[in-house]
Image (tube, grey):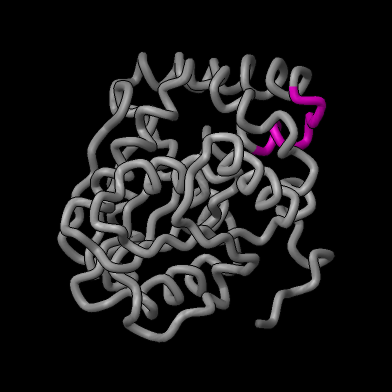
Amino acid sequence: MNIQNPSVRPLQKMFDEVPRRYDLMNRLLTFRMDERWRRKAAKLCLKDHPSHIVDICTGTGDLACHLARYNPDGARITALDFSEPMLAEACKKFNRQKLTGVEFLFGDVSELPFESESIDVICIGFGFRNLTFKNIKRDLYLSEIYRVLKQGGKLVIVETSQPKNKMIKSLYHLYLLIFVKYIGGFLSGNKKAYHYLSYSAIHYYTPDELKSLLQNNNFKSLNINNLFFGAATLTLAVK
């Protein structure tokens, strides 16, 4: 598998530097709601008894953990990420929680190591923004996801969004600007990563813009559910 040089992938260096406090910061910044949202996503992924699920941009494996817990039919689960430190943390987490049934894979979404039309479900928890926000490879990532999904296969996305209510949106952006950017950067010890998180979340797609993006990349049967007044969404798209 051809993995690109990290020097030309600026986000990789940032994610390589944050795994030690990554989970703690996720829990603090979402008041632990991120775990509930990932659990919902995992159950949606497993709903139609898939044979193979791929969790892309798995990070420290939170979504993969939920997939492993709620997998009564023994679906094959692959968790992929381009950050080796993140994958190392994910493996430690699985060992601590005594979970099994997940294959961890070092790889990039621009070159998914799977045959065309071979995957039932692709899921991603809070990584879709990194693939699509002002990213020159956005369409390449989406075409790769589309390529490896079977006809009728599902793409399940949990991601930050934009509340429709103007007052809630203003408060949410203020929270991102002050608490996430400055306090998150201070507590994590990585100001750059949380400045990026704040900026990208403030300027990310609305649900309608996300829907248009997916439709323009040939996905159908879109269903977008708001989470916590629209601060995040759970999206189901079908090939």
Q: Residue at x 63, y 24 (%)?
A: 25
Q: Residue at x 38, y 78 (%)?
A: 148
Q: Is residue 204 visible?
A: no
> Residue 232 location in percent, x, y?
38, 33
Residue 234 x/y as whole percent: 30, 41
- Left or right: 167 with respect to 132? left
- 149 and 14: which one is in front? 149
Looking at the image, residue 13 lies above or below residue 110: above
Total number of numbered discs in the rendering? 0
Residue lying at the far bottom of the rendered structure: 115
Q: Identify the image quadrant of residue 106.
A: bottom right
Q: Which residues are magenta?
A: 188-196
| Quarter the N terminus occupies | bottom right
Q: Answer whether residue 194 is magenta in the image.
A: yes
Q: Is residue 116 left or right of 86 when viewed as pictured?
A: left
Q: What secondary structure prevails in the magenta region?
A: helix
**Quarter-wise, where is residue 17 in the image?**
top right
Q: In the rendered view of the protein, which quadrant contains the C terminus?
A: bottom left
Which of these two is toward me, 7 or 153?
Answer: 153
Let me know if residue 145 is in the magenta part. no
Residue at the location (71% across, 29% down)? 21
Q: Position of residue 22 (x, y in %)?
A: 66, 33
Residue depicted at x 44% and y 44%? 63
Task: Please tell me which residue lies in front, 39 or 135.
Answer: 39
Compared with 116, 165 (above or below) is: above
Q: Position of residue 209 (x, y in %)?
A: 34, 50
Q: Nearer the viewer, residue 193 or 33?
A: 33
